Amino acid sequence: MLTAAEWEALRLTLLVAGEATVFGMIAAVGFAWVLARYRFPGRVLLDAGLHAPLILPPVVVGFVLLAIFGVQGPVGRWLDAWFGVRLAFTSAGAALAAGVCAFPLMLRSVRLAIEGVDPKLEEAAQSLGAGAWDRAVTIVLPLAWPGLVAGAVVGFAAALGEFGAVITFAASIPGETQTLPLAIYAALQVPGGEATAARLSAIAFALAIAGLVASEALLRFGRRGAGA
Amino acid sequence: MRVAVRQRLGAFRLDVAFEGPEDGVTVLFGPSGAGKSATLAVVAGLTRPDEGVVAVGERMLTDTAAGVFVPAERRRIGVVHQDARLFPHLSVERNLAYGWSRAKGERRIGWDAVVDVLAIRPLLGRSPRDLSGGERQRVALGRAMLSQPTLLLLDEPVSALDAARRGEVLGFVAELKRRFAMPMLYVTHSADEARTVGDHLVRIEAGRVVGEGAPGVMLPVDDVVGEVVAPGLVRVAEDWAVGRSVWVRLEG
């Protein structure tokens, strides 16, 4: 049904968006927690900085990533020298670019969810003998679960569709960094490529539907897991 | 139980000192905004006083001069509020198990005993959402008791209930005190409740202790003739044990 190249683009897209979502969500929970629970100097600045990818053109995000994580960039050079890891023009780099652009959306959703948990319930848990980590795992995160799922779904969808940052930072290398949107764009650059573009677009559409179905399942799982 | 703390909370100054019996109910009595709940928060370890001491039995929980502050999760002080604060994502049974499973090494108060005294066995499989107000308070009492506290704090535990439920839940509180010899600190602004459950009464006004003594002496019954419920209808007493009120209809 799909050609080998189309399968490859699909696999790569899922990999890139999946990595972007997993790592993005871990960072989002951490930063959301800090922003929701602590007051410290520079908090507003941190908040604004974390939201920057949302308001910057994606190409600029890609360019900034290149400046920092590129082979010549300060972090990129260090990663290369110490770990032999290169991010620019690799699928891990595509995931980083997609994840950074999707991050503010995940952060927003997670933060609202954490702030929405009644602090009185946490106090109750504390008086019942639960320490800070214990409360986070048994009270706050389960109650914030719907917001976490929503954040992951929105983040995954955004990472799936990220174009500008990925092509700037990771280029459009088939089988390595050419995710669906990049493959669709590349197909349209070739005369007679409309059919390929249409098929790839249909795949993107199917992915979006699958993502929604998966999020419903996750929500139901969360409700059952919570024992309510 | 010994409490002597000072704390500045915005414009409000809390400066209270009192001692309560180790095996009985100490009532903190006073109007809203007197500092009763702030005192409870200090005893529970949810807030740190500017200076002072909190001790339960021989155990020093807060002593600002010596730099002692046991965090709330290690105080073994149970708290019940007027809003039961049950965990909405857990069943009644798992709410009860929350403190119980975190007090494994020090269980003196048995699961079955508490569940039976509070008559909450039929509720175990339910969700807190599906409980009535009185049932919620009973589960909250059970959850606090099963965390094996050395002191139970009750912050207006029946204020949100109607008169009948109030009497019923107060009956359960009295039963817990009798069965488990549990010292309690009971916050209320109701003279009826204070007389019903209290062994010792501490009267608080504007952040200060203004009197201490036996509830019957501090709040003589003829202080309060009754409560006008409707024109011509006065409620003169409430029998907590059966949750029934005595009404007098004024005629003529």
Image (cartoon, coloured by chain):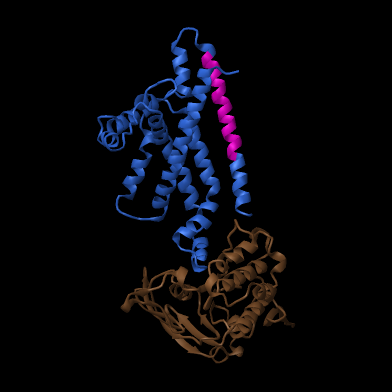
Chain colours: A blue, B brown
- The image quadrant that residue B59 belongs to is bottom left
Foreground residue among A166 and A1: A1
Please, which residue is most extreme toward the top here?
Answer: A191
The one nearer the camera, A219 or B50, is A219
Residue at the farthest bottom position = B217
Whole-percent x, y for residue B223 in the image: 58, 88
Instruction: Look at the image and give the residue range highlighted in magenta.
Output: A196-215
Image quarter of residue A24: top left
Q: Quadrant of the N terminus of chain A?
A: top right
Q: Is residue B138 left or right of residue A198?
A: right
**Dominant secondary structure of the magenta stretch?**
helix
Location of the C terminus of chain A by quadrant is: bottom right
Asked if residue A59 lies left or right of residue B183, the reply is left
Horizontal relation, residue A90 to residue A67: left or right: right
Residue B139 among magenta residues: no
Residue closest to the eye, A22 or B193: A22
Q: Is residue B36 above or below residue A159?
A: below
- How many discs appear? 0
**Residue B230 appearing in the image:** no
Q: Is residue A81 visible?
A: yes
What residue do we see at 49% from left, 64% from top? Answer: A130
Residue A86: give x, y in percent of width and height.
Answer: 33, 31
Give the image location of residue A8, x and y in percent.
50, 22
Indicate whether A34 appears above or below B17: above
Question: In percent of the image, x 69 and y 61: which residue is there?
Answer: B125
A209 falls in the magenta region: yes
Q: Position of residue B152 (x, y in %)?
A: 54, 76
